[in-house]
Image (spheres, grey):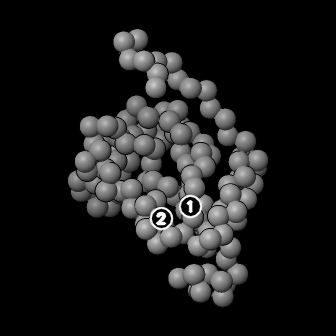
Amino acid sequence: MSKKWQSLGVSALVTPSFPHCSFRAKHADDMGLMLEYIFLWNVLNYPAGIVPITTVKREEQSFSDKHNDGWTNLVNETCKGSEGMPISVQVISHAFEDEKALAVMQALDQKVKFRMEMPARQNPDVKNA
């Protein structure tokens, strides 16, 4: 794969980091399988990093597709009440070229200028880590 990228002049690849925002804790067993979007690159020894670029908008709190299967239902349930959650992209570069991934991440961050305030604690009994 690296040779193909190099022959095409690709220094870094920008991909989704997940199909939507982060999943709910109660769905971790099922939705955690979708982490293949990110862990694949680490297994293959490609440096990769995540950059938040936007948040879920009010009109983006539902999901549907032509499959209408269990995955569709889980992603749709995760979308409910997700307004304001961060959405990220992943930047991948060639093995041992971490600095290229970091440079693209920095360029994206400087261009998008995404900044987010931490939400207020929902449960006053839970301490921040």
Say which residue label 1 marks: 48
**Amino acid beneath label 1:** Ala
Indicate left or right for 94 with 120 as reference: right
Residue drawn at (56%, 61%), measured in percent from left and top? 48
Q: Residue 40, position in %: x, y?
A: 43, 66
- Residue 54 in view here: yes
At horizontal 62% and vertical 71% (from top left) the residue drawn is 96
Q: Dot 1: few (<14), some (14–19), or many (≥20) neighbours within 10 Å? A: many
Residue located 36% across and 56% down the image: 34
In the rendered view, tell whether residue 8 sits above or below residue 111.
below
- Report whether 24 appears left or right of 42: left
Task: Tell me which label, 2 or 1, sits earlier in the chain.
Answer: 2
> How many numbered marks does the figure carry?
2
Note whether residue 14 is visible: no
Q: CA distance from mark 2 to mark 1?
A: 7 Å
Outermost front residue = 96
Residue drawn at (38%, 48%), measured in percent from left and top?
63
Towards the viewer: 5 or 20: 5
Element at label 2: helix
The local secondary structure at tag 1 comes to: strand
Amino acid found under the numbered disc labelled 2: Asn
- Residue 62 in percent (x, y) is at 39, 42
Asked if the residue under mark 1 is in contact with the one under mark 2, i.e. CB atoms within 8 Å, the reply is yes
Q: Which residue position holds label 2?
A: 42
Percent x, y for residue 9?
Answer: 70, 81
**Percent x, y for residue 124?**
40, 11
Give the quadrant of residue 125. Answer: top left
